[in-house]
Amino acid sequence: MAVTRERLTRALAPKVVAVIGDKKASGYNWLRSMKEFDGPVYSVQVDENEIPGIEELGIPNYKSLTDIPDQVDFAVCAVPRQVAPFIVQGCVEANVGGVTLFTSGFAETGEEIGVELQNKIFEIADPSGLALIGPNCMGLHVPGLGVRFNRDQPAGVQGNIGFVSQSGTHGMNFSLTGAAQGLYCSTLVSFGNGIILEASDYLEYLADDPQTEVIGMYIEGARDGRRLFRTLREVAAKKPVIIWKGGQTEGGGRAIRSHTASLASDQAIWEAMIRQVGAVAVHNLDEMIDVVKATLLTKRTQGNRLGLIAMTGGQSVVLTDAFEKAGWKVPTLSDDSYAQLSEFFNIIGGSYRNPLDAAGTIGQDPKHLDTIFDILNADENIDAVGMELSATFMARRWQDKPEEFDRLINSIKRFRDESDKPFLAALHPSHVEEAALKARLRLQEEGIPTFPTFERAANALRKASTLSAV
Amino acid sequence: MTADVIAQARAERRTLLSEIEAKQMLAAAGVNVTETRLAASADEAASHAAELGYPVALKVVSEAITHKTDVGGVELGIADESALRAAWDAIHARVAEASPGAELQGLSVQPMAEPGAEVILGITQDQQFGPVLMFGLGGVFVEVLKDVAFRIVPLEPRDASEMVREIQGFPVLEGFRGTPAANLDAIESMLLQLSEFAEANPDVAELDLNPVFARPDGAIAVDARILLTSDS
């Protein structure tokens, strides 16, 4: 029986939560992670030695799911694998919405006993319509409701990124590293072996979820590739989808007798599939974060001509190299722009060809930055604007004279709000990591996207701009 | 006709179709291929050639031989009947030396198509995504540079258009150093036909159309290879 949307919604947006089998040896990770949950949390534990420790946390414990006086929407199951089928049976009987099976040791081991237990769980869960997440996974993270599987994950903040991960680690890393960059999830699911619900089910949910504006996915392989292809085609037409494919699937081992089959590597087919559905491929966590950030925080452009504002001549050169290598053009500006720039631009130790080597000019009068932004906004040769924020020269000064940093931020915000052209900034931490971090966090609060290198900025804007959904 | 070709191959426990069988299936699906006939003797070849019109190509037909050119099994641009008879003997001699004991069904006769930019179109089955299509430029581009694009079946017209433009060598198709521009619409139509062909024929495990001549006036497949799935 298919899991209904109603049942899945109960599981992924729960009002009542239960944790089954948490214990002292694991530091009560699950119960502690649910501390910020926006609703009742119950524990289920039969071991008399464990119960006092759980009750000390202030969490009511029951010997069985059916004893809980509330209707449980979402349960986490952290029991040994031999016990897992009984817990799943209990979830069915107690009409739990959905359960995360953190428990591992199933088909992923390749052991006969593991495969048998997994089949048993499937046979119990499948006819009941129980929304079973996993097994062998970290399950659910919904910061807006305080649902977490790691205590460092954010709570009490409504995010807008849906994330689907076959791996618990990569899902967790995205939620933690992303949050440090001001990027928060609406709903994150780590689904492990995915025996009942697989990637396509979560993608369909996130496509319809009003909180979710962009979807990221980490995936190693698809159980039903045809369905994943069809689902992605529909979902990516509605919302931007960014896909990180890990690992290489082994070939079939059959004798290949055509050029076509010999060239159809796993990687080539996945990259083609991702392009075909209108999603974009990334290859590591940092790139995932960069592209999600650019997708959420920069405007889109169909054009590829960039106006660049740099702080030194040397940076102008490598900034241009980085963007051109990522497929951008750094063209000459219009005659009109040059006529205006020539009136005030300091060309001693500076240049305004494009990139604009502008430190001296802006240093002379900060208002010049607004004028430069206005000129680039009006220039028909330019589709997007990138800027170097030099921590090397400026981060200490911003700390000593915060009003200068405020002025810079206001100039950027004015441009961002008035112009249809995408804006992004590169801010390398340089030798002043702490000061640069403070600057980055401040920019982050203002919704101004920064990237640690020119290369990452260029790549992020390029990939975000190729996404088919707007 | 398509079902007959597959049924016969299955009955004979073959998975590799002959070029003639492959082209019959493709022609039935509306794919533009050069008409190709089997000749068991030099006399039969001469009569086919007279009907098809010179110049013609002769190619060895044998279940035992996958790569015809590797065993000297191909003669192109045969201008008349005496050249045809000489080519017939030459191919038999070379194949006998390169592939002794290989059983030949005969040689195929086909008219020489007017050349164009050489492209390859293909089908293969992916373990996860099922049938996929490939497109690339032929010859060195596909074999050495692996400059090809893939799409999952079924293709939408936009997919065909994008995959043709995705390859690095695309400027060659737009006309390059005196080579005329290829008819891109014809290539895209052929890709969409192959997408339907792959959906309609799950028995086809692999297909190469290599080369297809992409000319200003259209596209035509001059060689075709089909490998059936090993099960069923």
Image (spheres, rainbow, N blue to C red):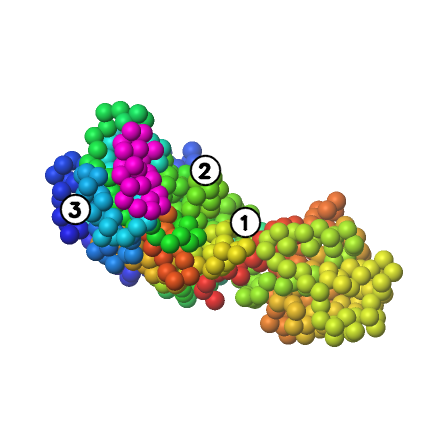
Circle 1: residue type: Glu
- Asked whether the residues under the numbered discs 3 and 2 touch, taking CB atoms below 8 Å apart as contact, a structural biologist would say no
Circle 3: element type: helix
Image coords of residue A355 (percent x, y): 73, 60
Magenta segment: B72-95
Circle 2: residue type: Gly
Residues under labels 3 and 1: Cα distance? 50 Å
Discs 2/1, front: 1
Q: Residue at x 80, y 64 (%)?
A: A362
Taking the image as drawn, is residue B72 in sight? yes
Image coords of residue B192 (percent x, y): 32, 59
B106 or A244: nearer the viewer: B106
- For this orientation, the residue located farthest to the left is B11
The tag on residue B5 is 3
Please tell me how crowded label 1 is: few (under 14), some (14-19), or many (20+) other residues with Cα within 10 Å: some
A426 or A155: nearer the viewer: A426
Q: Which residue is mark 1?
A: A287
**On the same chain: label 3 and label 2?**
no
Please tell me how crowded label 2 is: few (under 14), some (14-19), or many (20+) other residues with Cα within 10 Å: few
Query: Magenta stretch: residue B88 in it?
Result: yes
* Chain of the residue displaying label 1: A
Q: Which residue is mark 2?
A: A27
Discs 3/1, front: 3
Q: Residue at x 50, y 51 (%)?
A: B169
Task: Please tell me which of labels 2 and 1 falls first in the chain.
Answer: 2
